[in-house]
Amino acid sequence: MKVLYVASEVVPFSQSGGLADVAGSLPKAIRDRAVSCRVVSPLYGSVPQSLRETMKFIGHIEVQLAWRRQYCGVFSCNLGGVVHYFIDNEYYFARDGLYGHFDDGERFAFFSKAVLAILPLIDYFPDIIHLNDWQTALVPLYLKAYYQGDERYRRIRTVFTIHNILYQGRYGFAILGDVFDLPDSFAEVVSYDGCINLMKGAIQCADRVTTVSPTYAQEILDPWYADGLDRYLRTCQWKLSGILNGLDTKSYDPAADPVIAHPYTAETLEGKALDKQALRQDLGLTESNEPIVALVTRLVAHKGLDLVKYIFNDMMRLGIQLVVLGSGDSAFEDFFYSMQQIYPNTVRAILGFVPEMARKIYAGADIFLMPSKTEPCGLSQMIAMRYGTIPIVRETGGLKDTVLDAGDPSGEGDGYTFKTYNAHDMLGALDRAVGAYHLPEVWQGLQKRAMTKDFSWGRSAAQYIELYKGLLEA
Ligand code: GLC
């Protein structure tokens, strides 16, 4: 079986969010199970020079997008045993930032067309093309519109994964032919609520649709979560399933993380206590017996920060120190910055994306707060658990599927959860966590269970391979 994995961002070449982590890890885990899996992504201007030097030029073709004929170079490299291809066109991809340009629709239509057009050049005709998010949503449509006459393409089956349903790729109908290069007969396929909706088109044309946790797969059938797409998803629920993401357990390993001063395992938690001390010194927080609560997140509303804002003083009254790392909406940046002025000894706001500091916080903090309004899967709660930092999460999406409340009758709990999107419910969960923190035996039990939970990619990769196999047998 041959799989081509297509994503608009892939670690370590490009990244704006969690999709890149998945695209950087899952193909390797699939390959480790003896299934061929190669990856295609755009060659952005921001790909580090050191990685460019590992690439070789395969050749170039011309890609037609309506009346345009665009240069499409193809580079490739082998990273950890996985072959990566890169679509090169400087006009589209040598720009600042991955997304947010006026012509993103055209840029990713070009990318999607190129993915199919390069197959003869790279001499790799996959059995499965695995697409991710709206940027690649046109691939199943182009396959149906332009390639059904070619046996090598007709056999290809497609899987479309939704990493976040809030980004659907909505456009006006004026550009159906002129930019998206779709024949009029496809107008109905992409049409949704009066405009072009690329994600809807992919859901209709892909053979299977997945999302990144079982709970999110249920949630997006509900209007509260799906931003309008629930109505359509309910009609094709049979092809929808949820497969939980894994974590790169090699990179995120407190016993071997080069960034943290005192490595540790579930058996040697003394190291974590030293990392906590180091973090306090680094950040100038006062010595005390209070737990450090951490937020490492993009500072945007759907991460649940309005709950934190609403209840901030009550949280601090529970006897905690708080560290925030992240950037985003200026309203949240300003808020956390001003809280640092009000609580100079116990609150630190680091406003930026500082990967090394993130790791020091995962290692040095005691409690990790992630009260998201919606969270398709979420990665940070898994990293925190791996580092023995107990998560407090709202029961949504992947958060619900990865954290089990300490009060669970099974005695297997490894974190604290709350159900409704309500600030006082979050406060209640934090109160329980702070209480348990002061009972060392209880706390260490939680830490050990969290640290040894299986978040490796193997389990997910096996489920994707089953899904692919099912499609080929069908
Ligand atoms: C998106 C989701 C996040 C998920 C990630 C990877 O960024 O918001 O919850 O973990 O994709 O699938």
Image (tube, rainbow, N blue to C red):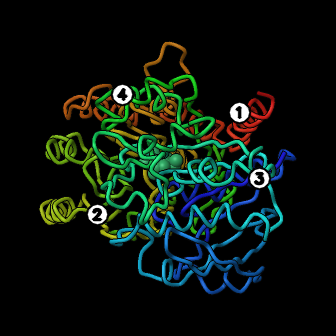
Q: Is mark 4 within 8 Å of ligand 1?
A: no
Answer whether labels 4 and 2 touch (C-beta < 8 Å).
no
Name the N-terminal-most of marks 2 and 1. 2
Q: Say whether residue 379 is visible.
A: no
- Residue denoted by label 1: 467
Give how far apart the Cα atoms at labels 3 and 4 are: 34 Å
Number of the front mark, 2 or 1: 1
Instruction: Check the image and report above or below for 218 versus 256.
Output: above
Horizontal side of 364 relative to 88 (left or right) equals left
Q: Earlier in the sequence, mark 3 or mark 4?
A: 3
Give, as a three-letter code, the residue at label 2: Gly
Q: Nearer the viewer, residue 196 or 415?
A: 196
CB under 8 Å between discs 3 and 4? no
Q: Which residue is mark 4?
A: 231
Residue 268 or residue 313, whichever sits in front: 313
Compared across the picture, whether 346 is left or right of 142 comes to: left
Say which residue label 2 marks.
Answer: 328
344 versus 321 height, above or below: below
Mark 4 or mark 2: whose residue is earlier in sequence: 4
How many discs appear?
4
